[in-house]
Image (cartoon, rainbow, N blue to C red):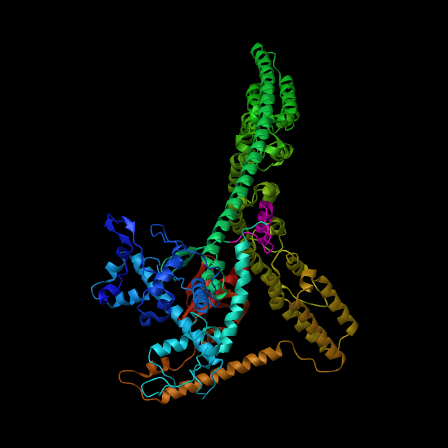
């Protein structure tokens, strides 16, 4: 036959008669009968014999049991079991190879897949011709993409089968052929001699391959790895052919039970069937409860082609872990896990809904019970209201008929309060009681004078207080809004206001105080404050304004101080007026008059400390200072009247003022008298008695002061020196010497500066007088001190006394402040601090002495 006839087209046109495509469907009249490949065709290929004798015989032998393939049926895919990355099973190739080997050993002419009539394509001969034919392309060979896949799969399987046949042949030859041995083909004594026949038909006559027989006789040892395994996968070490054969045998042995077990898994009687374990909904919920509530946080995974939203990081790399751990069918397991998770979520949701429904039922049950209780309470309340209305109707009838009295009314409402306390408070029955009782109380208290008869009606008011005002009903508005407050403001307050304004005298506080003390527990706080603010305080203010200390014999504290507990800070406005009136009287006061002490001493704890100290410093201490200056200490004939005048104020005057007064005007004289007495060889027993006598005259307030104790200790030291025949130092001598030394030093420095200025050349236009004015470069303080020394006045700082951060100095009897920065001198007057000159200071000192005398 020609070349074209020997080539078979790979398509359905060769398999069917009158086949055509209509609207994507293939229609044909009948199927063609194809020539079946013989064993020689499979073995020798294009080198097979052209005789048809064997073909006819083979066709006749196989015609009876060869079944034609029905290409109209869909393609069925047979599962090959679990495919692992390191353990792949190519079942089709293995079956085909076994068939090929079986055919080789038995010389059977049964065609295999792709060797005879196959799935839509012919044998190798026709296939090779089709590949080499330019007139046919892939679209004409198989018109669909599925057809092309079938073609590619057939070609791949054919190449694999060819490779496996070559490997088996090489393995068979290597068993007998050693390295360097030239006996080629000795192994064929154990076979049918197929390999040699093939070589002989291709012109092989023995020896090495090639034109010049330059090929090697022994084949190269190939290092094989398992199918589809990449280089370096899992650190796999390539094995030689014998080891590879053993590995394949182990694979087949390990795969066979898996396949058998897999085939029997569907059977109920399968021994290898794993017993399934189930978990109940209660166990699942208990497990989830033990795990606790986890915080759900969304995680967006954008590592793949599609964005995934995850709520649990546990399954973030599930696919990678499945591939690493060789998990079979990861997609199916993933889907099953999703189904299980959804089922668990449904169970949890159902349990959560069930709990919510139970809680709702429980809350509804409680609400039902609450409503039932409320309904019963309202029913009881309705019955109580009917009884209360009946009592109120009876009271209204008695009121309209004029038979109603305070006693019967109080008894009726007290019974209502005792029997229906909640309803009494809820419906504010106290207001109704007040509306009935108010007219009766007004008639009862008409013409009442609270100052003359303060206890009138107290029992009746006390009885109605419980009815009109509950003790547990106090709040910030109770004094204004309660019916009891309304009753007191309408009945008691008008009578108190009339009596207080018209008949009460502030200098006699007892009537008003007696009434307020009697009614203290019955008067609401708002009514009490109203009485104090509108009646008592205005009357006291007018009385203080009209008070004259020179004429009135009753001290003002007698009728003002009783109001301190009730009025308190409200009397601060009266204190300023009282101090002003007292200061006017104290200008002409003499220390021998004890009435000033009786008037002022009660106010020591009432006035604030600053005002009290200012009053004492300005009006009392100067008078006592004059008395001590006039006081003479004479051990032979001692008169103590002036000393007693001063000591009577020791507990009233602030202690620092009293100590300063004693140090300046008493102990100076006392130590001088003691010094002269010790220098005249005295009797020490008399001096001791004299010392103890003066110490006993000092009050405890002064004896507890450290400065007073120092002065007394100074006298004791002088007495000890005289007793030890040691010369007694005159008191104050050391201080005087130090003062003189400082004074002489300052005068010398002033003379030196004046001489230095005098030697300097005089400036143009300035005379000698101008130079002398600039000579003394003394500070303002030194100038004032020198001026005081010139007029024999005492100039010294007052310890602990400051004004606006500046030290206060004593210039004679005048307190002054020296402003060195502005070169000014200020003196303290009655109206405050005033700017003065040095001559003004001298005049002020002499005037103060004149006023004292």
Q: Position of residue 69 (x, y in %)?
A: 36, 54
Q: Position of residue 23 (x, y in %)?
A: 24, 47
Q: Is residue 815 left or right of residue 519?
A: left
Q: Nearer the viewer, residue 109 or 847?
A: 109
Whether residue 444 can be seen here: no
Range of magenta residues: 269-294
Q: Residue furthest top?
A: 401
Quadrant location of the N terminus? bottom left
- 13 relative to 766, above or below: above
Q: Is residue 329 left or right of residue 420?
A: left
Q: Answer with the quarter of the image where residue 566 lies.
A: top right
Let me know if residue 289 is in the magenta part: yes
Quadrant location of the C terminus? bottom right
- 384 relative to 652, above or below: above
Q: Nearer the viewer, residue 305 or 568?
A: 305
Q: Position of residue 11 (x, y in %)?
A: 27, 58
Q: Nearer the viewer, residue 711 or 221?
A: 221
């Amino acid at each position: 036959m020609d070349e074209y006839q020997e080539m078979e087209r790979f398509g359905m046109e060769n398999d069917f008669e009158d086949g055509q495509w209509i609207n994507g469907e293939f229609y044909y009249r009948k199927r063609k009968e194809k020539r079946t490949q013989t064993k020689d065709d499979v073995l020798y290929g294009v080198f097979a014999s052209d005789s048809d004798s064997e073909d006819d015989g083979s066709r006749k032998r196989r015609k009876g049991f060869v079944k034609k393939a029905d290409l109209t049926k869909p393609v069925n895919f047979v599962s090959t079991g679990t495919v692992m990355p390191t353990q792949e099973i190519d079942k089709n190739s293995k079956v085909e190879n076994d068939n090929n080997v079986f055919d080789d050993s038995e010389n059977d002419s049964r065609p295999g897949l792709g060797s005879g009539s196959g799935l839509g394509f012919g044998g190798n001969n026709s296939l090779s011709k089709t590949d080499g034919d330019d007139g046919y392309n892939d679209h004409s060979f198989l018109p669909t993409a599925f057809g092309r896949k079938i073609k590619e799969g057939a070609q791949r399987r054919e190449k694999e089968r060819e490779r496996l046949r070559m490997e088996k042949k090489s393995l068979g030859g290597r068993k007998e052929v050693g390295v360097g041995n030239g006996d080629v083909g000795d192994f064929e004594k154990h076979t049918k001699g197929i390999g040699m026949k093939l070589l002989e038909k291709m012109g092989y006559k023995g020896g090495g391959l090639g034109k010049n027989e330059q090929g090697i006789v022994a084949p190269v040892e190939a290092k094989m790895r398992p199918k589809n395994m990449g280089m370096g996968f899992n650190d796999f070490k390539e094995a030689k052919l014998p080891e590879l054969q053993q590995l394949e045998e182990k694979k087949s042995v390990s795969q066979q039970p898996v396949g058998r077990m897999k085939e029997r898994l569907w059977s109920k009687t399968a021994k290898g069937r794993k017993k399934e374990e189930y978990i109940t909904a209660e166990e699942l919920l208990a497990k989830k409860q033990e795990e606790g509530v986890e915080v759900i946080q969304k995680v967006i995974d954008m590592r793949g082609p599609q964005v995934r939203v995850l709520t649990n990081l546990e399954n973030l790399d599930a696919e990678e872990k499945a591939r690493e751990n060789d998990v079979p069918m990861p997609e199916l397991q993933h889907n099953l896990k999703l189904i299980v998770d959804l089922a668990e979520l449904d169970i949890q949701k159902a349990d959560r809904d069930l709990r919510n429904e139970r809680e709702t039922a429980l809350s509804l049950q409680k609400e039902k019970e609450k409503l039932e209780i409320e309904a019963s309470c309202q029913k009881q309340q309705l019955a109580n209201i009917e009884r209360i209305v009946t009592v109120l109707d009876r009271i209204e009838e008695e009121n309209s008929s004029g038979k109603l009295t305070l006693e019967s009314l109080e008894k009726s409402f007290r019974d209502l309060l005792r029997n229906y306390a909640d309803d009494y408070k809820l419906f504010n029955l106290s207001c109704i009681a007040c509306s009935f009782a108010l007219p009766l109380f007004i008639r009862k208290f008409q013409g009442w004078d609270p100052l003359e008869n303060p206890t009138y009606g107290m029992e009746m008011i006390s009885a109605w207080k419980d009815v009109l005002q509950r003790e547990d009903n106090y709040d910030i508005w109770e004094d204004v809004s309660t019916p009891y407050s309304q009753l007191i403001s309408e009945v008691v307050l008008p009578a108190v206001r009339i009596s207080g304004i018209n008949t009460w005298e502030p200098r006699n506080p007892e009537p008003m105080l007696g009434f307020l003390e009697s009614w203290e527990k019955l008067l609401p706080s708002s009514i009490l404050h109203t009485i104090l603010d509108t009646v008592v305080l205005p009357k006291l203010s007018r009385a203080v304004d009209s008070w004259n200390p020179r004429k009135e014999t009753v001290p003002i504290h007698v009728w003002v101080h009783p109001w301190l507990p009730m009025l308190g800070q409200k009397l601060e406005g009266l204190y300023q007026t009282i101090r002003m009136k007292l200061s006017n009287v104290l200008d002409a006061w003499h220390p021998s008059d004890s009435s000033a002490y009786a008037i002022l001493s009660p106010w020591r704890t009432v006035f604030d400390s600053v005002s009290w100290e200012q009053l004492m410093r300005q009006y009392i201490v100067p008078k006592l200072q004059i008395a001590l200056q006039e006081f003479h200490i004479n051990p032979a004939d001692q008169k103590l009247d002036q000393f007693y005048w001063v000591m009577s104020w020791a507990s009233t005057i602030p202690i620092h003022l009293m100590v300063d007064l004693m140090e300046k005007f008493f102990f100076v004289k006392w130590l001088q008298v003691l010094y002269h007495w010790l220098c005249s060889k005295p009797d020490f027993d008399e001096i001791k008695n004299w010392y103890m006598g003066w110490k006993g005259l000092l009050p405890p307030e002064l004896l507890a002061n450290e400065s007073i104790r120092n002065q007394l200790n100074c006298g004791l030291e002088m007495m000890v020196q005289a007793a030890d025949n040691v010369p007694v130092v005159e008191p104050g001598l050391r201080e005087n010497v130090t003062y003189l030394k400082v004074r002489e030093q300052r005068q010398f420095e002033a003379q030196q500066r004046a001489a230095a200025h005098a030697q300097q050349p005089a400036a143009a236009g300035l005379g000698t007088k101008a130079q002398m004015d600039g000579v003394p470069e003394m500070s303002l303080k030194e100038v004032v001190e020198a001026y005081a020394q010139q007029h024999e006045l005492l100039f010294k700082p007052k310890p602990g006394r400051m004004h606006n951060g500046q030290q206060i100095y004593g210039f004679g009897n005048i307190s002054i402040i020296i402003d060195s920065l502005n070169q000014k001198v200020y003196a303290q007057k009655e109206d405050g601090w005033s700017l003065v000159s040095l001559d003004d200071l001298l005049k002020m000192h002499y005037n103060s002495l004149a006023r004292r005398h």
